[in-house]
Image (tube, helix red, strand yellow):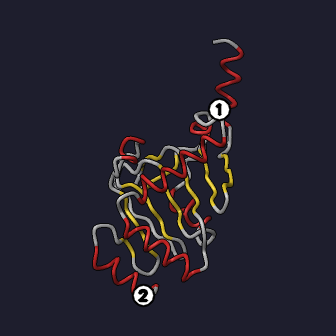
Amino acid sequence: MSIYIRVFIWLFTFRKMESHEFEKNRVYLTPEEYFHFGDLKFLEGVVSSMMKSGFIGRRTTYGSLIDSFSRKTGLEGFAMLYGHGGYRDGVWFIGDEKRTPVQNWIDSLDGERAVIALRICNPNNTEIKSKRSIVLHWNSAASLREVFQGGYVRIYVPGDGYLDGNYRGIKRALERLA
């Protein structure tokens, strides 16, 4: 193996998670995802359309819930984690160099933004908790095709728990937040 390949592998392996701010939103990229986005304008466009089409899309009640939650709490924008996820020994983790548990990552950002959006695989449909921010995540794989075709997105609302597939629960949460 050439020295150039070894240096590239070393750099790739030990890179830390990157983060970029777009208006009121922050995007976090795991090292392997960072190489897919050379242009930050392109990244901003992908993330913006992913939030509108993939996470919210035809789920207008999710959009209404997020808007009401934002007004009530004063929190704005979203934090999106874009990368790979895995599951091992009962823990859903981020595929970064440290295998950070997803719940720890959520806890570190909870209350900074209205929404924490996880664009990572959730192979075991693991559930999470949040005290101050809404959390959006998939129940399984998070391929771009699934994202734009409206794959199954779960929504966790502090104080209400999981509300995906629970129209009455969403309605009660909207009334509470009004």
In terms of depth relative to the viewer, which is nearer, 43 or 96? 43
The quadrant where residue 97 appears: top right
The x, y position of residue 170, in whole percent, is 35, 76
64 lies above or below 102? below
Label 2 neighbourhood size at 10 Å, few (<14), some (14-19), many (20+)?
A: few
In terms of depth relative to the viewer, which is nearer, 149 or 30? 149
Residue type pointed to by label 1: Phe
Q: Is residue 9 left or right of residue 166?
A: right
Q: Is residue 22 left or right of residue 60?
A: right
39 lies above or below 73? above
The x, y position of residue 148, in whole percent, is 39, 47
Label 1: state its secondary structure. Answer: helix
Q: In the image, which disc is placed on residue 35?
A: none
Q: Which quarter of the rendering shows the N terminus?
A: top right
Residue type pointed to by label 2: Arg
16 lies above or below 60? above
Q: Identify the residue at image location x=60%, y=70%.
A: 76
The x, y position of residue 73, in whole percent, is 57, 81
- How many numbered discs? 2
Residue that carries the numbered disc 1 in the rendered image: 12
In terms of depth relative to the viewer, which is nearer, 90 or 126? 126
First in sequence: mark 1 vs mark 2:
1
Q: Identify the residue at image location x=55%, y=80%.
A: 71
User: Alpha carbon of mark 1 to alpha carbon of mark 2: how far?
Assistant: 47 Å
In terms of depth relative to the viewer, which is nearer, 118 or 56? 56
Residue that carries the numbered disc 2 in the rendered image: 176
